Image (tube, grey):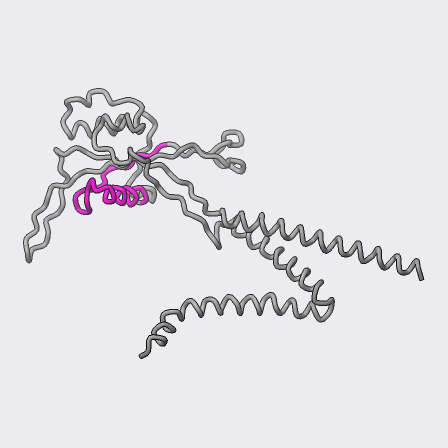
């Protein structure tokens, strides 16, 4: 098989997609333009067709905007807080801003006691403990695992996520301070989460035998992953399409209106002259 044949096979999906778009444009807009051109002329039919297309784009953009479908922007996600995402000791929780104050009695406490003291301090400062059956738990766990492994603090199989604490993210302003009346709640307070990670006891694998069940090292220091919620821009493309298409649609409507006024003026002048 020649090199040109291999090149054609490799580019087939791209060419097919391009041809599909071109054919769709020709069939949808070209057919409407052709029908209008036979009745009102080529120039006016182009203006009318383009106005109709922009109006349709506005309606489509509004539908995408309302329901969050179609062309989407970045989804909400947990992102790292530069320099303080991976926290490996309790004092660093305060310096990173995860805790306002250090828990009492943490100095000199055993690892098992320290875990309970830190968890209580999170709850006392307004954090919510996320249950393992909550979808938010899985999202925070996946993001924390990614940051841990990218940073090199721990590798896969060396740790287990044991707790997730969440704070912030409230929307405002609310009508009558009612969560269900959030029609104008366009603003959000910063949303943070702290994922508690427990190192595992190293397991020696032997050829031909199933690996032993991983166990949490109760004497090891817990580590924490501190993250902030990025709300993303899921509806941004729809907003741009709606506003941009609406501006073009209104401009074209104005041109059609202006043309109609000029035409009527010229016709009335011709009748008066006659």
Quadrant assignment, res 119: top left
Residue drawn where x is 15% and y is 41% of the image: 200
Using the image, determine if residue 3 lies above or below residue 43: below
User: Which sits in the foreground, 130 or 146?
Assistant: 146
Q: Position of residue 214 (x, y in %)?
A: 14, 45
Residue drawn where x is 57% and y is 50% of the image: 242
Q: Residue furthest top?
A: 104
Residue drawn where x is 29% and y is 39% of the image: 131
Q: Is 175 on the left or on the right of 79, as rendered?
A: right
Q: Quadrant of the C terminus?
A: bottom right
Q: Is 60 on the left or on the right of 138, as rendered?
A: right
Q: Position of residue 99 (x, y in %)?
A: 30, 26
Q: Position of residue 101 (x, y in %)?
A: 29, 22
Quadrant assignment, res 196: top left
Q: Is 41 on the left or on the right of 76, as rendered?
A: right
Magenta stretch containing residue 173, yes or no?
no
């Amino acid at each position: 098989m020649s090199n040109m044949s291999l090149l054609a096979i490799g580019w087939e999906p791209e060419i097919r997609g391009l041809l599909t778009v071109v054919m769709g444009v020709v069939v949808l807009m070209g057919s409407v333009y052709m029908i209008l051109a036979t009745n009102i002329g080529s120039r006016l039919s182009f203006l009318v067709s383009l106005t109709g297309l922009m109006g349709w784009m506005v309606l489509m953009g509004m539908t995408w905007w309302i329901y969050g479908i179609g062309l989407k922007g970045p989804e909400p996600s947990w992102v790292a807080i530069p320099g303080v995402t991976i926290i490996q000791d309790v004092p660093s929780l305060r310096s990173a801003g995860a805790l306002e104050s250090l828990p009492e009695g943490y100095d000199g406490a055993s690892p098992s006691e320290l875990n309970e003291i830190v968890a209580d301090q999170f709850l006392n400062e307004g954090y919510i403990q996320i249950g393992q059956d909550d979808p938010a738990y899985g999202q925070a766990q996946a993001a924390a695992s990614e940051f841990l492994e990218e940073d090199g603090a721990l590798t896969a199989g060396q740790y287990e996520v044991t707790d997730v604490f969440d704070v912030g993210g409230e929307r405002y302003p609310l009508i009558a301070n009612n969560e269900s009346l959030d029609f104008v709640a366009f603003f959000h307070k910063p949303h943070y989460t702290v994922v508690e990670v427990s190192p595992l006891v190293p397991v020696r694998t032997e050829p031909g035998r199933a690996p032993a069940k991983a166990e949490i090292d109760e004497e090891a220091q817990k580590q924490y992953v501190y993250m902030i919620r990025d709300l993303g821009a899921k509806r941004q493309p729809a907003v741009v399409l709606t506003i941009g298409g609406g501006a073009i649609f209104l401009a074209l409507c104005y041109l059609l209106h202006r043309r109609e006024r000029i035409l009527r003026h010229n016709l009335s002048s011709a009748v008066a002259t006659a």
